[in-house]
Image (tube, rainbow, N blue to C red):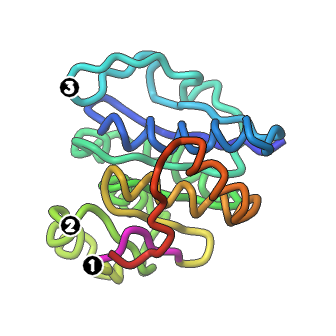
Amino acid sequence: MMNIGIYFYDNAEVLDFAGPFEVFSTAKRLGADHWNVSLIAQESTVIARGGFTVQADFTLANAPALDVLVVVGGVHTEELKKPPVLDWIARTSSKTQLTASVCTGVFLLAEAGVVTHQQVTTHWEDIPDLKSTYPALNVLEKQRWVEDGAIVTSGGISSGIDMSLFLVSKLASRELAEKTATQMEYRWKNSAAL
């Protein structure tokens, strides 16, 4: 089995977690039946952007060991002040095959020490803040996603869906990624460049 966990939190951007969840769960239905896809949060209930209330599958206390970790974006500033969250991200990422972020999720990876000098990206609006807060990072602009070793980061919202399809192609096959996009009636922008 492959465990894919998506970490989300209060004021997370809805499509930052729902988009990747849809991609991975659709890919599971279409052939990657050994994948387990779950939403993980510090507490069992999350109130995402716009007041969207979501029940997590697991909390940090009972989350399974993960093969792939995706950390999502949104209003992330409070998450940066939570040592238990940052510790969990750091410990989990050290054991995963891949760690990814959507949008401002990269700030959590940076604060947790998961990314220190790698090539990364985020939502275009947050690039100046990322550069100034973590100057050792090589922050790339005009990229839907950036792959640097076992770390993959993406821009915001729809870029996270494109990145997730890229991860499907990496973890399974390009054929499954294309089949997943077709099933979702989504036009996959399968190039990292904007």
SS type, badge 2: helix
Characterize the local packing of mark 1: few (<14), some (14-19) or many (20 or more) Cα atoms within 10 angstroms. some
Q: Which residues are magenta?
A: 142-147
Q: Is residue 96 left or right of residue 135?
A: right
Residue at 58% in and 22% down: 57
Ranked by sequence position, the earlier of labels 2 and 3 is 3
For marks 3 and 1 on the same chain, the one whose residue lies earlier in the sequence: 3
- Which residue sits at x=75%, y=63%? 173
Q: CB atoms at circles 2 and 1 under 8 Å apart?
A: yes
Q: Is residue 26 above or below residue 148?
A: above
Q: CA distance from mark 2 to mark 3?
A: 21 Å
From the viewer's perspective, is residue 39 above or below residue 114? above
Query: Can you give x and y, in whole percent of width and height, for residue 56 in the image?
Result: 51, 22
| Position in image of residue 70 (x %, y %) | 52, 49
* Pointer 2 or 1: first along the chain: 2
Q: How many marks?
A: 3
Type of amino acid under label 1:
Glu
Specify whether residue 84 is in view.
Answer: no
Where on the picture, by quarter, is residue 104? Answer: bottom left
Residue beneath label 3, please?
50
Q: Are marks 3 and 1 in contact (CB under 8 Å)?
A: no
| Front residue of 138 and 35 | 35
